[in-house]
Amino acid sequence: MARLAGKVALITGGASGIGEATVRLFVEEGAAVVIADIQDDRGRKLAAELGKRTAYVHADVSREADVSAAIAETVTRFGRLDCLFNNAGYGGVLGAIEEISVAGFDETLGVLLRGVFLGMKHAAPVMKRQASGSIISTASVAGLRTGNGPHVYSAAKAAVIHLTRSVAMELGESGVRVNCICPGGIATPIFGKGLGMSPEQADTTIPLMKGVLEHLQPIQRPGEPLDIAQAALWLASDESSFVNGHALVVDGGLIGGRLWSEVKQRRAMLRAALGLDAQ
Ligand SMILES: NC(=O)c1ccc[n+]([C@@H]2O[C@H](COP(=O)([O-])OP(=O)(O)OC[C@H]3O[C@@H](n4cnc5c(N)ncnc54)[C@H](O)[C@@H]3O)[C@@H](O)[C@H]2O)c1
């Protein structure tokens, strides 16, 4: 299949997890892909493995100069920019509200929200000139519903969803679509790294994470990076050409509410508490 034949994409956070799976899928589907990340060894290795339609650039998405240089490098190397996937992220500052430092708050928003803003800002002129393009950002179910991530992470992801809708209203008029994806629990190293592990250590936690995530949602399997990559593929392709300002939830039903098995358990507890089973 070549659903992205002739297209050029820049994928931030492309060296690991969801980003890596998306890089692989986009290349498979015919796109030229620039990987932007701060994990240089991993990013370079992936680009070398995938061949000459792939390149790696070091870019810290919280820094404007890095983001604008990554977009410029993509255009210089491959001639255009059809898709920007603002995907880089991390768990950010943890803890109870009274424990969160201002520095931790600023740093978290710097990566998760400023990074997305900078991507949109610098992709916009290129895509407007082309009168086409698809900007996709990775938000989260944590941005839709509390209790699915740390405070500042959740607030940043909610802001990504709203920024997506707001910017979609502007750029849509120029033929540029702006959407985001809200993943549920996806088995990647992000959880281990968030708890202080090195990327290498965190990689080894994936099988354990799959076990942890398996029964969280009605679809009884862990979310995989490819689940999100497939959603990004659709949003990057012309198949979604009338989709703009959308937050696509890919979570196996996680935010739908309480699992049916839990509802049954609660009903049984209620019956027991009311003495109905003894009658
Ligand atoms: N895994 C999940 O359950 C889940 C759920 C919802 C949303 N997300 C989001 O998905 C995105 C990808 O995360 P993942 O789960 O694949 O984790 P991951 O750790 O495997 O990948 C994140 C990538 O982003 C890169 N990165 C981090 N900070 C960066 C920066 N400042 N500049 C450039 N690159 C940077 C990392 O080096 C890494 O390669 C993140 O935005 C995350 O918030 C993940």
Image (cartoon, rainbow, N blue to C red):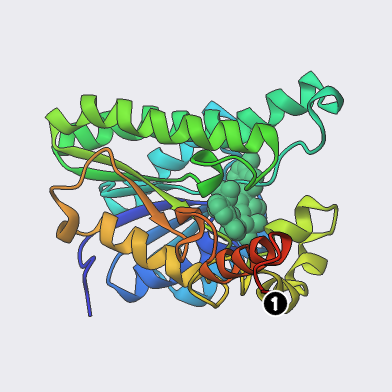
**Residue 84 visible somewhere in the drawing:** yes
Residue 244 percent location from the top left of the image: 22, 41
How packed is label 1: few (under 14 Cα within 10 Å), some, or many (20 or more)? few
> Residue flagged by tag 1: what amino acid is it?
Gly
Q: Which residue is drawn at 72% across and 25% down?
A: 105
Q: Between 27 and 199, which is closer to the camera in this rendering?
A: 199
Regarding mark 1 in the picture, which secondary structure is present there? Answer: helix
Q: Residue at x 32, y 43 (%)?
A: 179
Quarter occupied by the C terminus: bottom right
> Residue 61: which quarter of the image?
top right
Snapshot quadrant of residue 5: bottom left
In the rendered image, which quarter contains the N terminus? Answer: bottom left
Q: Which residue lies furthest to the front in this view?
A: 279
Question: How far across and how far down the image is residue 66, in percent?
Answer: 54, 35
With 100 as the anchor, is 175 left or right in this view? left
The residue lying at 22 percent from left, 74 percent from top is 2
Closer to us: 189 or 127: 189
Going by the image, does 253 lie left or right of 221?
A: left
Give the residue pinned by disc 1: 211
Q: In the image, what residue occupies the spot 46% across and 34% down? A: 160
Ligand 1 within 8 Å, label 1 CB: no
- Figure disc tally: 1
Q: In which quarter of the image is residue 124?
A: top left
Percent position (x, y) of residue 250? 42, 60
Examine the rendered structure and indicate whether residue 118 appears above or below residue 36.
above
Closer to us: 221 or 279: 279
The one of 76 and 252 positioned closer to us in this rendering: 252
Relative side of 18 to 271, left or right: left
Let me know if residue 68 appears in the view: no
Q: Indicate the position of residue 72 as horizontal and vertical percent values.
A: 39, 38
